Image (spheres, rainbow, N blue to C red):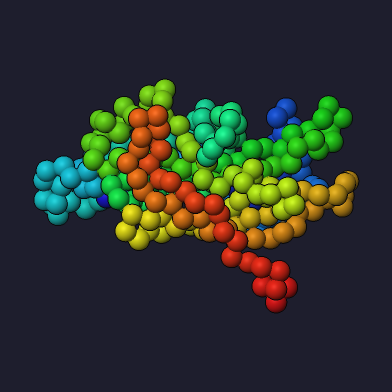
Amino acid sequence: MHSRVAAVKAPRTHNRRCVTGSSGRRREGGESERQRPNMSRRVFASVVLFIVVVMMCCGTGGAADAVASKSVDEQSLQRIDLFVPNQTLVLPKKGTASETKSDSFVSPSLVSAGGVIAAFAEGHINAQYTADGNLSKPISSDVVAGYLDAKWNWSALVGKVNSSTWKAHSVLSTTDATNNNLVGVFYNPTTTTKGNKVFLLAGSLGELKGSGEQRKRENLGLKLVVGDVREPTGSESTVRIDWAAPTSLLNESTKTA
C-alpha cells in the first residue's frame, strides 16, 4: 500500500512554550509544566492519509502494472481526513464514559495486520484556564486509533470515513492508570505488527502535581500495549482490535539507573 501523511511544522519559539486554552488565550514561557522529553515538533491541523488511487492493499486489479509503469510521484493522489480536531469523536475503550473530542492530533502512524489497517495518533486536549488566568486543567493526551478494512476500495473507504458512524477509538488513555499512578500524557506512539498482533509502544508522564511555579510531572514511563485483530461483533462493528491492559517497561530501578 502506498500512503503518505501530511504534516504542518510548528514555528520555532526559541524554547518558549506556548499553550492555547479553551478561551483562545495564548500563554508563553514560564508555564507550570515542563516540556515533554523528545516531543514531536510537528503539529497537525488534521491527520490526513494520502492513498494512491491504485490501492495495492485493497487488491484492485492491475495495481502492479500501474505502479511499474509510473513512479509514485507521477501518480494522482487522493486524500481523506481520518482524524479532524474538534470534530472526530473518540470512543473510550470500556465503561460508560462519554465520547470526547481532541483539540489536535500529532505523531501519526499506520500499520496493517490480519486484514485491518490501523491508523494511530496522539489526541491532545488543550490546557484550560480560569477567568483570572490561572491553570484549571493541564494539557493531556491519549493515543487513539481508527480502523479500516483492507478489503475496502477507495470509494468504500471514503464513504465509511465520511459517514456519521466513523469514530476514533482510545487505545492508551489517561483514565487507564490506577489512582496512585495517574497518567496525564501519552506521547510518541510507535507501532509494529507480527501476524494478527499489533504492538504499540508509547512514552508516558504522570499527572501535573504541585501548585504555582512548583507544578511538575513525574513518573516518566514507557508503556506497551498488545492488540489482537478480531472479527467485529454485531454491537461493535467498528472495533477491530482487542487491546490488552498496558504494561510498564520501566521500573523504579530502571528509572534511577
Of residues 42 and 34, the one drawn nearer to the viewer in this rendering: 34
What residue do we see at 68% from left, 54% from top? Answer: 205
Above or below: residue 48 compared with residue 181: above
Instruction: Give above or below for 151 relative to 187.
Output: above
User: Where residue 114 appears, x then y in whole percent?
Assistant: 30, 50
Q: Residue furthest bottom?
A: 257
Q: Is residue 29 left or right of residue 170?
A: right
Relative to the observer, which residue lies in front, 24 or 121?
121
Q: Furthest residue to the top?
A: 164
Is 126 displayed left or right of 202 in the figure?
right
The image position of residue 79, as x and y in percent, is 35, 36
82 relative to 110, above or below: above
144 vs 29, nearest the viewer = 144
- Closest to the observer: 236 or 64? 236
Counting the numbered discs, the total is: 0
Residue 171 at x, y = what percent? Answer: 51, 45
Q: Is residue 87 visible?
A: yes
The picture places residue 23, in percent across and down from the top left corner, at 73, 27
Asked whether residue 13 is in view, the answer is no
User: Which quadrant of the view contains residue 76?
Assistant: top left
| Residue at 52% over, 39% down | 93
Asked if residue 94 lies left or right of residue 204, the reply is left
The answer to which image quadrant residue 68 occupies is bottom left
Q: Residue at x 59, y 44 (%)?
A: 173
Query: Residue visible at 70% across and 77% down?
Result: 257
